[in-house]
Amino acid sequence: MTAATKRKPVDILNLAPKKRRSARPDENASNKWIEHIRDQDPGHGLASLKNFERVTSFRFAAAVLSKKTVERCISLLETWRNQALPTDTFRTTSRDPVTRAAMFVRSAKILEAGAELNILLLRLAELCFASEMDSAKAGSTRVGSDRINDVLRQLEWPQTKESRKALHNRLMKGRKWLSICGNFGSGLLCLIPFTSEAPYYISKDTCQQMDEAEIKEFQDLIGPKKGFVRSLCEFGNSLQKMVLESWDMEFRCETEKIISLNAYSEDELLSILQPVPYHETSIYETGYDWSRPQSWPWDWPIDPTWTPPDYRCDLCQATQCDCISSLTKNCCRIMHYGAKGRGIQVCASSRGGIAYKKDSYIGELTGQLVPPMTYTDGMALELHRPDIADEPVVCQVYCKEKGNWVRLVNHSCSPCARFVVKVVSGKVRVMLQAIRDIWDGGEVTANYGRDFFKNNDCLCEICEAEAQPNQGTNDLITRLPPSSQGQ
């Protein structure tokens, strides 16, 4: 729209309500669009948008600020948990802009036809491609033909006019996403509708056809809700990081039973998209009545995982070390495993490789340290001290309220890992140890023994195949009921 055809601003605060309508209004009927969205989404806080000049900008802003956006974020997360995506789509160790640009073009082509998550990743691939190409301009105002040819060679595409046009079109789409995201960053991609649905009718084509004035007004309209949008973008950034870097985290929406978001306030909506805080080490809770454990040889009360200064680390044999911080990072992903619920999948540095070798340590189980027998809800581990006479139970490690991802490890009658008590970096810790090589894409499992299931059948792949109850034996020093069973 040119300045000569500039429309009079519409004040939606003083717009009188009219009869309910459901048909999509004409493209430029400003008042009818306001009425239409109010009618279809009565809980929308349209008052925050105040007034506007461009209908597309208004519809786009209204879509981003709606509760449907939060529903979309939760749906994306659920899809990611359930979908075994080819992580190599975004996996590269190269720092060369051309190599990375070619990878993102290849990723975009793979993801072009797919569900919502694939659509998000397609947008992200296009945005990243444009970002890499623009970073390689080295001060030039445009990407040179040599750079385009370099990317074509990386892709092994023919050096033809059609190939250059296809690459140029991909570059233009990526630049449009960069422009729309602006200062909010790529996390905004999660907030943009994936299909043209009522009542906003914002599609990919709508976004790609927006001009600079429409994009600027869109960003101005969501400006008053900057804090809300940035919080949603943080979720989007986290989800993208999970895809790009094989890095994972839990969110509160995964631990709450959500039936409908209609009754949620804005603060409550943001709360359920917050990450679940992980604790790098267990927390000694002093507010309990701690009885001295049998055969305890040191002063009491004290943190039951404490060790004397001369104790050697079981991993390196040193009395002072940082072994607990040097465990392999970012090699695990939370996934849904059917009836078992959530579990842990490993991600090797290269597809098809070994993520954890036999006898290596995968992580530490953390939680609240409370007196023995405090909790019986299936989320507590009775921690024995094998370094004390009679190996007494000194505490429980309670994982329900505070802990880390290790509590999500599922049971198997043919496990690839086990829980063991070890002295590591000056404390007694419950460590998850591989008992055989664990390959890329495999599930981390441990054997929790026949007592864990009580009246329930084992859901592991062995027993599901044999359709019989768990016959496993408890060969562990410690036993942890995982939260993922029955979730």
Image: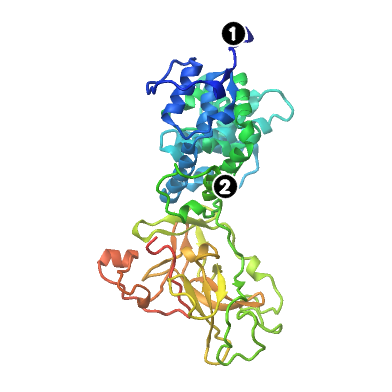
Q: Position of residue 406 (x, y in %)?
A: 51, 65
**Circle 2 residues within 10 Å: few <14, some 14–19, many ≥20:** some
Q: Position of residue 174 (x, y in %)?
A: 57, 29
> Which is more foreground, mark 1 or mark 2?
1
Specify the amino acid type for callout 2.
Ser
Point out the image quarter for the C terminus.
bottom left
Q: Is residue 169 visible?
A: no
- What secondary structure is marked by label 1? helix
Q: Are marks 1 and 2 in contact (CB under 8 Å)?
A: no
Q: Position of residue 329 (x, y in %)?
A: 59, 60
Compared to 425, does 255 lie above or below?
above
Q: Residue furthest right?
A: 139
- Residue at the disc numbered 1: 5
Residue at 58 percent of width and 41 percent of height = 233
Instruction: Tell me the distance, in whole angstroms, between the alpha carbons under discs 1 and 2.
Output: 42 Å
Residue at 64 percent of width and 78 percent of height = 313
- Residue at the disc numbered 2: 238
Compared to 279, does 175 lie above or below?
above
Point out the image quarter for the N terminus.
top right
